[in-house]
Structure formats: structure tokens, C-alpha cells
Image (spheres, rainbow, N blue to C red):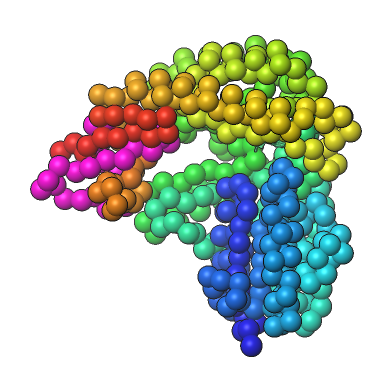
Amino acid sequence: MANQKTFYLETFGCQMNVHDSEKVVGTLISQGYRQVESVEEAGLVLYNTCSIRDKAEQKVFHRLADFRKLERQGKKFGVLGCVAQQEGENIFERAPHVSLVCGSASYRNLPGMLVELEAGKRSTGLDDRQTTETFETEFTARGNPHRGYITITEGCDKFCAYCVVPYTRGRERSRTSDAILAEARQMAGSGYTEVQLLGQNVNSYRDPLRKRTFSELCDHVHLPVQSGSTRVLEAMQREYTREDYLQRIAWIKAARREISITTDIIVGFPGETEAEFEETLSLLDEVGYDGTFSFKYSPRPNTPAQTMPDSIPDGEKARRLSVLQEHQKEIQKRLNARHVGQTLEVMVEGTNPARGQLIGRTSQNKTLNFTTAGGNAVPTPGSYVRVHVSASFPNSLLGEMVG
Ligand code: 5AD
């Protein structure tokens, strides 16, 4: 018999979901549940889901189909997060063995929903898009003991033509600076040496208490551009032109300290011509990104772009994606080479025993693997050390600890 008070949780998608799962785990533990590492051991099986692209959404339905037969053993299944919010009670039709559906702004209701579930009922928690609440909880079970996430904003009001986020995560809202600082102090007190501020749109942060502004704290800016073509940007409802974007990049580059820049790109948006795609390639050259995340356009429910013909065949989207990724790889090779000879401070993230290396991360958020000269004490994860860079690759740097 499966123990009803055990749960298994699998997380799909973005860092917001990863962090939401940390809060959900903490909440379930506070309700007397114990987390287990496999579906087989669990009484309650939860999926925290992503619906940003169709492939991500299909994953949860595949998982649910794979484990459907385990319902006979008395296991219960729950769908959390963006697919839950998007599909709502339709999920019960597509996967009748599911008994819990809960959107991300409803997690504060989980304790009550679990009680319903234990009583053998189905439970649904769907968010009102207008909600102004954020999920404040003292029960966050963080997975990493040195670097941890803090939510500063939730939701999005931008309504880009291709994007489901405004429909799955509700309107844009900010936590108070007091709540954020209290959480950061508590983390520092329990040994955290790095915090990462999270939000769908962190630069929209507005302190409800009007005490603090969001000025850039880190040496790394992620500024999603999506396309290098002003025509495509307009069709995407991005509210800026190629030139506006490049102006912002120029400001970042004019900063006194060196800041790394990364971005997101969609290829094959409805109607994107070859020439427009090439404008994205030339934008990559002009900006010189330290990293990019790139995707084939995927039509999403509720979005304005869903009504536009998805005109670029999948094979052509795949070709553009691979051309773009090859192009970007050459840029990263060139940009990373400039670090060779520099001495950079890294936070020690862990070790790679197979390679006899330590794994570090620079303030520009780059992976810098390094060795220590014989006789030096091996630094502990979470500490900060200086590393001399000796070699570079498209996705990482290599070096030796100094001193
Ligand atoms: N199709 C493909 N990529 C998308 N993204 C968001 N919506 C879609 C979609 N419908 C990408 C964007 C965004 C990143 C998180 O996911 O590049 O910045």
C-alpha cells in the first residue's frame, strides 16, 4: 500500500517553476507529508508544469499516461503550474485519474486542497488573472544550500503575441522590499552566499512600499530580444524596435563595469522571411551576446498569434534554429577568449571529480572550471576565490586558483 502521506514532485520549465516547487515542497512537508524520490514510493504524484511551448505541455500528458495504471494502487495525481492554470478542469477529461489541479497563484490554498484530496474528493484551485496576491510562505525547501532564489515579481502584463504567460501567471505584481530583504537576511543567516532574484519580468519591479528601486545588482543582464527585425517585433507586440533595443544595449555596454548580456530568440514566428531571419543573425553580431536561448515558434492557446497562420514549416524552423545556434557558438568562442589571462572572482559551486576540477561561477554568470595548485587547501562550495583564466570554450572557461 502506498503511504498516502508521501509525495513525489517533478518540475518542468523555468526557474520560477523550480522555485515554486521549493515552496510547494516546504508547504507539503509542513502538512506532514514526506518527499520521496520515485513515483513508485509515493502516495501523491505531482507535476509542476510548463506550457510555454507545445512540447513542454505535452510532456505532462505523456507522464500522466505513463503512470495511469498506478492509480489502481491508490496513488493520487496532481497537476500544478502553468498547464493546470491553462487547461483547468479539462485536465480531468484528458486524464481522469488526476484529482488535483492547481495554478501557481493558488498554492497558498494547497493545505486546504490536500485535506479535500485526503477525503477522496477532487480539488481545483484556479487563479483569477486579476489577483494581486503573491505566494508568501515561510516554508521554502531550497534545493541548493549556497545559492537560492527569491521571488521579487510574479506575472506579466505585456501580452506579447506569442506568449501564454499573462494567461497562466496572472497580472504583474511585486513583493514589498521589506519582505524581500527579510528573506535575504534569513538566507544569509543560514549560510547562503548568493541570491538570485526571480520574476517573469524582474525589470518591472516596483516596490509597493516605494522604498527601493530595481537598479541592476548583477554583472549579468538577460534581455530577451526575440527577433532582430522591427517588422517581426511589431507583429510580436514587443513595443520596441531593433534600434530601441540596440540603444539599451549601448547603455549597458557604457556601464563602468563589464556586464555580460544574454537573450532569448524565437525563430519562425508567423510570416518571418529569410531576410528578417538574417536581421536576427546580424543583431547577434552587433550585440555580441555571451549566451542565447533560442526556440522554434510554437503556437499557444489564447494568444493573439494563434490566429495567424503558422506559416513556416517545421523543417525550415529547425534549419533557422541550427544556423542561428552555430552562428552564436562562433560569437561565444570569440567573446570567451577575451577572458583568457584575466583573474576573476568565482563562487565555488561544487567539484567535478572525474576531471579533477572545481566548478566555479563568475559574477557575469559564466562557468569557470578550475584546479588548485598542489598544496593549496581545496575551497568549499559557497565560498569565493580568485581564478586565473587559462583557456576558453563556447560555454565555459578554464583556469587555476590564485594563491
Ligand atoms: N514559441 C516559442 N518560444 C516561445 N517563448 C515564449 N513563447 C513562445 C512560443 N509560443 C520563448 C521566448 C521567451 C522564452 C521564455 O520562451 O523566447 O523569452
As drawn, which residue projects farthest toward the right? Answer: 307
Nearest the viewer among 246 and 251 is 246
* Apparent side of residue 127 relative to residue 110 in the rendered image (left or right): right
Q: Position of residue 194 (x, y in %)?
A: 41, 46
Q: Position of residue 241 (x, y in %)?
A: 70, 15
Nearest the viewer among 245 and 11 is 11
Q: Is residue 48 magenta?
A: no
Q: Position of residue 142 (x, y in %)?
A: 49, 59
Q: Residue at x 72, y 42 (%)?
A: 53
As drawn, which residue projects farthest toward the bottom? Answer: 1
Task: Report whether residue 359 is seen.
Answer: yes
Q: Residue at x 60, y 76 (%)?
A: 40
Q: Residue at x 29, y 52 (%)?
A: 354
As drawn, which residue projects farthest toward the front? Answer: 315
Nearest the viewer among 396 and 221 is 396
Up/down of 146 relative to 125, above or below: above
Q: Is residue 388 magenta?
A: yes
Quarter of the view holding residue 161: top right
Quarter of the view holding residue 364: top left
Q: Residue at x 44, y 56 (%)?
A: 144
Task: Report whether residue 382 is seen.
Answer: no
Quadrant of the image containing the N terminus = bottom right
* Count of number-bearing discs: 0
Q: Which residues are magenta?
A: 363-389
- Quadrant of the picture in which ligand 1 is shown: top right
As drawn, which residue projects farthest toward the left? Answer: 375
Quadrant of the image containing the C terminus = top left
Up/down of 112 relative to 127, above or below: below
Up/down of 47 relative to 314, above or below: below
